[in-house]
Image (cartoon, rainbow, N blue to C red):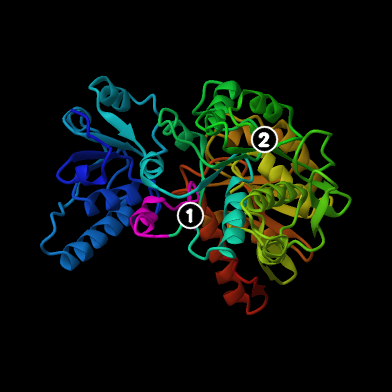
Amino acid sequence: MSLDLSKIENFQDAMVTVMGLGRFKQGSGVGAAKWLMRHGAQIVITDLKSETELKESVDEIMTWYDTYKKAHPTGHVYPPVFVLGEHHEDDFTNVDLVMQNPGVARESKFVELAKKEGIHVESDISLFFRYCPFPIYSITGTRGKSTTTALLGEILKRKNPKTVIAGNITRSPLEDLDWLLEEKEPVPVVLELSSWLLESIQDLGKGPDIAILTNAYKDHLDRYASFEAYVKAKEIIFEVQRPDQVAIFNADQEITKEIADHAKSEKKFWVSLSPLTEGKAGAFKEGDNLKFSSETAPVAFANTKDIALIGEHNVYNVLCASLAAHLVGVSDEDILETLKSFAGLPGRQQVIGEVEGVMYVNDTTATSPEGTMAALARFGNGGNIILLAGGSTKGFTFEQMGTSVQKECKYVVLFEGTATNDVEKAIGDVPHIRVDSMEKAFAAAASVATLGDIVLLSPGTASFGVFKNEFDRGDQFEKMVGALIKKTGSGELAPTVT
């Protein structure tokens, strides 16, 4: 029998399977496990990865459990059971609830098995939407959603320092739910939602107070049958809204205009790198000025020369976040002050440091060809880049990226993976080498780098295979830069972005 989710108290003594633990210490799987144990559920954590691969996450959960148990000796807190390296059918049929990690496809036979038995399949996001009493502002899109989420959160913190920033940005909102439920005054919540997380709220009957779609490009075609299917998943963010909730779209993409036609919201706003056409409300760029539209005349709230984020692609992110903040009553002054100081997130065209005249840039979150092309356009100077790229396929083609590489790169280091043959073919005659570790990649890059060059980690693919995830890939790169500075005794690390 499926669990009654109308009250959190009903989790006490419930049998729950957490499907997909993941490798982020505050991610969906770990966050869900902690929250469920805190509320008295008896949980089985199952993942196809081995105990060795998931050691950090397992240790995180067990350390948390031991600490919590000691602090609440009389509480009904059950120890977790781990089933790793395999799934058991009983864990999906003889339970009260299944918690599905976003990395697990909803077409999984085990997910289907649970649904066939009439068992609720939830995610950490769907549970949070069920119980959170405060405004939720959600961002999705192929590119820019993490930066937009973080920026909007930072702007809102000027109005309410307790603002929560979570979701696909590597933090489960369940880490914050319990203290939020004790708050007397509303606390804004900003959630980054991937297409997979959106699928988990499709039938919930509750959507975000503000929904933002930054853009839509071909991505995750290893998970979706077609680009159309991927876009359909993105559309869910608007399908679950009420007509009185706000929807924000990119006016410069035809596909987002089509999505807007299907949205339920009667409060549609737009962002654009050009003045908006008559009848469209929102935020736009005119010359160097960023402006909000109004019923009388557009109002400038920032100048591109004032904002810390660099690159045209980031102007869209600035417009989206600023518009959302403006719509919930944040002053133009507070918006501008945040734009002046927010330099971006780690791993997104992040300048790590310089060693003997060679700049090192961490762009590990460029997991699509378009992301890599954006980095090449920003840092390239006609052949001064040593690119670290390649990895696991997501159904991409690399012809356009290959053209950019041929124009901007003097050398390419390719990580082994299911996409690497295609990348290798696309880059043509550009000198390159294939490697199976960051240590080998960094050594190869450093050996050919000379004064004025840029060593750019911008893979254009997924990380799986050689690395745990994209952040592990970036962390390893940063450690190599730090070790090189220590070895040479020259150069310096750039200030850390927080």
Q: Give the residue at x 69% y 69%.
A: 354
How far across and how far down the image is residue 150, in percent?
Answer: 58, 55
Residue found at x 10% / y 62%: 74
Residue at the outermost left position:
74
Q: Looking at the rendered structure, which numbered label has been put on residue 329?
A: none
User: Residue 136: x percent and y percent?
Assistant: 50, 46
Assess whether residue 73 is covered by the magenta stretch: no
Task: Please say whether residue 25 is visible from this viewpoint.
Answer: no
Q: Residue at 72%, 60% (x, y): give it.
A: 332
Q: Which residue is label 2 attached to?
A: 268
The circle on residue 472 is 1
Q: Kindly identify the amino acid type of the residue bearing the numbered disc 1.
A: Asp
Question: Start and end of the magenta stretch?
Answer: 164-184
| In the depicted structure, whether residue 31 falls above or below residue 216 | below
Is residue 215 in view? yes
| Residue 251, image x, y percentages | 75, 35
167 with respect to 244 (left or right): left
Q: Residue at x 17, y 62 (%)?
A: 69
Residue 404 appears in which quarter of the rendering?
A: top right
**What is the quadrant of the C terminus in the image?**
bottom right
Q: Nearer the viewer, residue 118 or 356?
A: 118
Residue 177 shown in magenta: yes
Is 407 or 313 nearer to us in this picture?
313
Q: Image check: 444 left or right of 277?
A: left
